[in-house]
Image (spheres, helix red, strand yellow):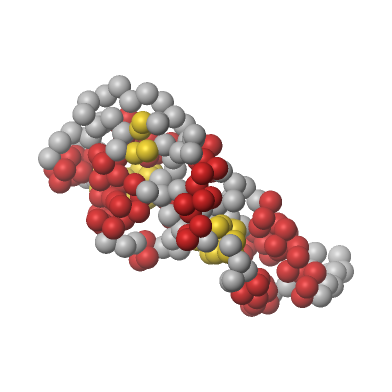
C-alpha cells in the first residue's frame, strides 16, 4: 500500500490530537506504527516533530512532556494550586506509612516486605502493599532465594508516569520524594485520581488511605 504524504503542520496536528485524547501516554512506537502508520515517517522525523510540538507549548499553561511510558500533556507545575481544585473532593491523602513504604521500594528495589519492615521498625500492613499494587505503582518482580521465598517488589512505569519521571535516575532525595508525594496533585489533563480504588483501611497502625 502506498504511503500517504502530509506536511509537518498536518503531522503535528495529528500527533497533538492523538496525545490529547489518549487516556495514557503515547509511546514513539505507538505513534509511529498505529497513529501514523500510513505515513512514511522515520523515528528521527517523528522525534523532530515531537520536539517542535514541545516548543510550541513551552510558554503555555499546558506542556507536552515525555514520561516513562511515552508523551502526554500536563499542566505547568506552577499552576497546581488552581488546577488541583478540580479534584478537591476526590484526591486521597496517603499516610506517612504508605509513603515511607513506597520510598523504600523506589530507592532500594528489588526489596521484600520483610526488608521494608526491618528498615521502618514496624510491620507493613498487607493493605498498604495491596494499595500500591492496585495503583500500579508497585509490582512483584520475583522472589528472593531464601527460606519462604518472599516476594520482591519494584516500582512500575505507572509509578514513573504519575510522578512525571522518565527513569529512576531522576528520583530526588528520599525525603524530598516523600514530601512531593504527600502534596502531589494530578498534573494530567484527565483526572487520573478518579481511578483510585478507595477502600477502608481496617488493618493496624499503618492505615494508609483517608479521604477528607
Q: Position of residue 119 (x, y in %)?
A: 15, 46
At 35% from the left and 66% from the top, the residue drawn is 169
Residue 110 visible to an observer of this rendering: no
At 38% from the left and 43% from the top, the residue drawn is 139
Taking depth in this image into account, of 142 and 192 the one nearest to the observer is 192
Determine which quarter of the picture holds residue 97. Answer: top left
Check the picture and name the quadrant holding the C terminus.
top left
Q: Where is residue 183 in the image (x, y as percent from the top left)?
A: 37, 48
At 52% from the left and 40% from the top, the residue drawn is 87
Taking depth in this image into account, of 194 and 43 the one nearest to the observer is 194
Taking depth in this image into account, of 172 and 114 the one nearest to the observer is 172
Against 79, residue 144 (above or below) is: above
At 75% from the left and 63% from the top, the residue drawn is 14
Q: Position of residue 24 (x, y in %)?
A: 59, 50
Residue 204 visible to an observer of this rendering: yes
Taking the image as shown, residue 186 lies to the left or right of residue 169, namely right
Against 131, residue 30 (above or below) is: below
Check the picture and name the quadrant holding the N terminus.
bottom right
Against 199, residue 34 (above or below) is: below
Q: Where is residue 204 in the image (x, y as percent from the top left)?
A: 22, 26
Determine which quarter of the picture holds residue 31. Answer: bottom right
Taking the image as shown, residue 26 lies to the left or right of residue 111, namely right
**Which residue of the protein is positioned furthest toward the front in this rendering?**
82
Amino acid at each position: 500500500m502506498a504511503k500517504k504524504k502530509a506536511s509537518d503542520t498536518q503531522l503535528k496536528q495529528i500527533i497533538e490530537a492523538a496525545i490529547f485524547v489518549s487516556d495514557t501516554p503515547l509511546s514513539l512506537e505507538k505513534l509511529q506504527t498505529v497513529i501514523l502508520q500510513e505515513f512514511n515517517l522515520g523515528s528521527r522525523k517523528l522525534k523532530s516533530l515531537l520536539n517542535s510540538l514541545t516548543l510550541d507549548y513551552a510558554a503555555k499553561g499546558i506542556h507536552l512532556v515525555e514520561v516513562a511510558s511515552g508523551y502526554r500533556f500536563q499542566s505547568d507545575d506552577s499552576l497546581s494550586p488552581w488546577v488541583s481544585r478540580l479534584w478537591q473532593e476526590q484526591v486521597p491523602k496517603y499516610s506517612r506509612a504508605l509513603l515511607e513504604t513506597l520510598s523504600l521500594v523506589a530507592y532500594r528495589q528489588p526489596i521484600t516486605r520483610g526488608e521494608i519492615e526491618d528498615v521502618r521498625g514496624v510491620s507493613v500492613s498487607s493493605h498498604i502493599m495491596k494499595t500500591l499494587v492496585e495503583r500500579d505503582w508497585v509490582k512483584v518482580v520475583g522472589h528472593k532465594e531464601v527460606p519462604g521465598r518472599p516476594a520482591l517488589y519494584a516500582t512500575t512505569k505507572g509509578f514513573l508516569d504519575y510522578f512525571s519521571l522518565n527513569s529512576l535516575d531522576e528520583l530526588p532525595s528520599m525525603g524530598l520524594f516523600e514530601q512531593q508525594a504527600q502534596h502531589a496533585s494530578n498534573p494530567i489533563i484527565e483526572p487520573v485520581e478518579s481511578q483510585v480504588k478507595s477502600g477502608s483501611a481496617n488493618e493496624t497502625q499503618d492505615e494508609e488511605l483517608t479521604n477528607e
